[in-house]
Amino acid sequence: MTTTPTTSTRIAVVGAGRMGQVHARIVDENPRATLAAVVDPFEDTGRRVADQYGAPWFATLGEAAAAASLDAVIIAVPDKLHVGVTVDALEAGLHVLVEKPLADTLDGARAIAAAAEKSASKVLVGHVLRHDPRFRTAAEAVRTGKVGSPVHFRASRIVPRSVGVANRGASPIYMYQGIHDIDLVQWISGSPITRVCATTAAKILPGLGVPGVDVALIVCELADGTVGTIEVSWALLENTPSGLASQFELYGTEGTLRVDVTGEGVDLTTGDGYSLPNTVLSPELDGVLEGVVPQQFEYFLQMIEFDRPSRIGIEEAVSAARVLDAVGESLETKGWASVSSD
């Protein structure tokens, strides 16, 4: 039997961009947590978010750690900054929830893993779909043998083009979107990706004067002989009812499974048109964010309070980084690339 903690976990959100703002709200709405600091090098952005929740603003994590008596951090900075901030947090003895991907390079992911190995802190990598009951059900079905041995899979994730415009080439699409499906494939199948062959196309973003490609298609071979494809794109029009077209399919020797997250169970038609409202990831209900993203934070709190294990180990996050590295190599060489095994 667990007991309710008598003290509030003091959290700093590092990075006050789109996801940082979501995390700040989730922390503020959780009765067992205190938003103790908002950290962002841009004062206008950082202060605006901090003031919204009555928290202090700091330009650096070091300043926040020295002044705010922190227990943990949520790291929502750009991918290329993950390594420095995460390593600093671990060396300061803080528990860490870091957005996916763990790092933008394989060497960076390894550096974080090395720091985590030396630290007693809890680490949760924000592969949020690990907390989605739909994908947890799929993983359980494979793990318990209900579909037999996996044979092949197809994963697709198509989002509105405004996402690509906002990204402006900061992270390649196979990293920004594909990291979700790379992790899903390895987790649900139970087998690591060992070889990839990737290609891209660019027609929409260049026409809008934005750097980057529109789509990445990745053919994968897994260690157990399973094969499949991962397709990620930001080609949807803005008036798409759900703002997402995404499926995961796996075909096994004894059965099949399919997770369709395009619709989330509610179809809504009004005078403004037809929509598929968000009911799973982070819907606002009764003025509070609910769903999988808040559940991820709740699980992070339970890791700290009750010593629960992480739902995604550091090595699994490093494994996903190995695949990202191989995808980059494949795009550069225009051929198959092997995934590092070290």
Image (cartoon, rainbow, N blue to C red):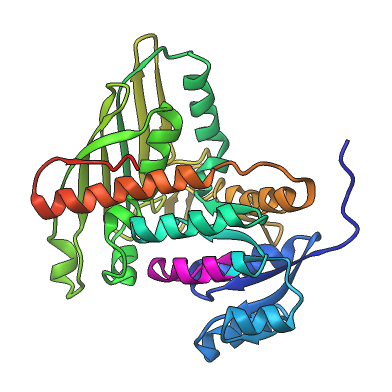
Q: Residue at x 24, y 47 (%)?
A: 326
Q: Magenta part of the protein: which range?
A: 74-88
The location of residue 200, given as percent across then percent down, is 15, 52
In the picture, measured across the screen, residue 91 lies left or right of residue 342, that is: right
Q: Is residue 66 magenta?
A: no
In the picture, measured across the screen, residue 299 lies left or right of residue 272, that is: right
Q: Is residue 119 above or below residue 1?
A: below
Is residue 184 visible from the viewing direction of this image? Answer: yes
Majority SS type along the magenta span: helix
In the picture, measured across the screen, residue 62 lies left or right of residue 183, that is: right
The location of residue 42, given as percent across then percent down, is 50, 87
In the picture, measured across the screen, residue 124 lies left or right of residue 322, that is: right
Q: Residue at x 38, y 14 (%)?
A: 149
Q: Is residue 298 above or below residue 192?
A: below
| Viewer-nearest residue: 172 or 62 | 62
Q: Residue at x 33, y 47 (%)?
A: 322
Is residue 200 visible from the viewing direction of this image? Answer: no
| Viewer-nearest residue: 196 or 53 | 196
The location of residue 267, given as percent across then percent down, is 49, 42
Task: Work out which quarter of the rendered image holds the N terminus and state it.
Answer: top right
Identify the residue at the far top of this view: 254
The location of residue 214, given as percent across then percent down, is 20, 58
Examine the image and state in which quarter residue 93 appears: bottom right
Q: Residue at x 54, y 32 (%)?
A: 136
| Viewer-nearest residue: 278 or 187 | 187
Identify the residue at the far front of this view: 118
| Viewer-nearest residue: 38 or 262 | 38
Task: Work out which quarter of the rendered image holds the C terminus and state it.
Answer: top left
